[in-house]
Image (cartoon, helix red, strand yellow):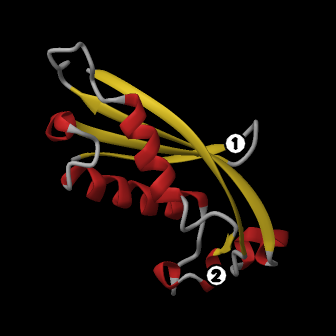
Amino acid sequence: MFSIEVRDHIMIAHSLPRPVFGPAQAMHGATFVVDAAFFTNDLDEDGLAVDIGAATRVLSAVLKPLNYQNLDERPEFTGKVTTTEVVAKFIFDRLRMAVDEGQLGAGSHRICRIRVTLHESHAARGWYEADL
């Protein structure tokens, strides 16, 4: 299997209003480094799994509405606790829509799996990964 992975970041605010989250129950900020990996079973006639430029543009477009936002106020997250895992799945779903719409170029139809990794810090990360 082949993969291209691109990276961007978002700065968000949110709270995690459950006792299990201790001090993170209060409003706080987070900077997530976001990696999106696009997997294919083969390469195209140019030797590409996915066009890196297209993947970079799509990831940036998916993240833009979240950047500098309070996730507690975003309608997409109403009724959800915005853990790293929940945010990773949200980003995955938006990337999947972009693939379905052909936004990653002529090879979009060959993408068979996506992994979205959110790095909370140098010591912790979470991700969502699934077949398309």
Give the residue drawn at x 51%, y 79%. Answer: 77
Q: Quadrant of the N terminus?
A: top left
Kind of residue indicated by mark 2:
Asp
Query: For the residue carrying disc 2, how many other residues have a C-alpha within 10 Å: few (<14), some (14-19), or many (20+)?
Result: some
Mark 1 lies on residue: 124
The foreground one among 26 and 61 is 61
Kind of residue indicated by mark 1:
Ala
Q: Nearer the viewer, mark 1 or mark 2?
A: 2
Tell me the SS state at disc 2. Answer: helix
Q: Position of residue 72 (x, y in %)?
A: 64, 81
Q: Is residue 88 above or below residue 20?
A: above
Q: What is the quadrant of residue 27 in the picture? A: bottom right
Residue 8 left/right relative to 105:
right
Residue 128 left/right relative to 40:
right
* Residue 36 visible in the picture: yes
Q: Is residue 79 above or below residue 87?
A: below
Mark 2 lies on residue: 72
Q: Position of residue 125 (x, y in %)?
A: 63, 43
The foreground one among 112 and 9 is 9
